[in-house]
């Protein structure tokens, strides 16, 4: 709320919720979205470790078992599923960024 663009918006007469929504949230949302959707791949990788350490059955345990047994079709399916999940997350983030980022708007 102390940045230059907020002071400029206040000087232009913008107040209250409009100032918060248009100026502050719009600028704060861009890095937050990038960070959240970039962590989808990290969550999948972390699940492998957590499931192995705590002996939880799940996608990570199935991946490790498929690799150790040489079950290539299952391993390929899990990799394809993970790839599609990360791709969809990144695509969704790109669409949200296009809607929220004021720099990417067409003029």
Image (spheres, rainbow, N blue to C red):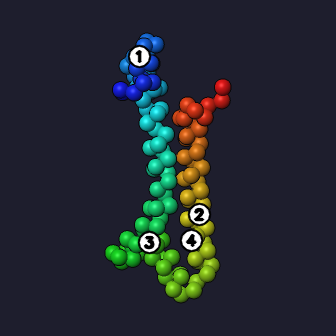
Alpha carbon separation for disc pair 2 and 1: 45 Å
Residue at which label 4 appears: 78
**Element type at mark 3:** helix
Q: Which residue is mark 1?
A: 10
- Separation (CA) of disc 4 from disc 3: 12 Å
Q: Residue furthest left?
A: 54
Percent position of residue 33, x then y: 48, 44
Nearer mark to the viewer, of 2 and 1: 1
| Label 3: few (<14), some (14–19) or many (≥20) C-alpha neighbours in 10 Å | some
Give yes or no for contact between labels 4 and 1 (Cβ–Cβ under 8 Å): no
Image point (47%, 32%), residue name: 26
For the point 40% across and 20% down, the residue is 7
Mark closer to the chain start, 1 or 3: 1
Name the quadrant of the N terminus.
top left
Determine whether label 4 and label 3 are within 8 Å by CB: no
Q: Which residue is mark 3?
A: 48
Furthest-bottom residue in view? 69
For marks 4 and 2 on the same chain, the one whose residue lies earlier in the sequence:
4
């Amino acid at each position: 709320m102390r940045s230059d663009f907020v002071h400029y918006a206040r000087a232009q007469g913008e107040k209250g919720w409009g100032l918060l929504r248009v100026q502050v949230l719009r600028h704060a949302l861009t890095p937050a979205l990038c960070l959240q959707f970039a962590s989808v791949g990290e969550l999948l990788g972390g699940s492998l470790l957590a499931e192995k350490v705590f002996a939880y059955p799940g996608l990570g345990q199935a991946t490790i078992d498929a690799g150790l047994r040489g079950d290539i079709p299952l391993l390929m399916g899990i990799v394809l599923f993970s790839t599609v999940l990360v791709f969809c997350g990144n695509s969704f983030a790109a669409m949200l960024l296009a809607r929220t980022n004021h720099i990417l708007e067409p003029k």
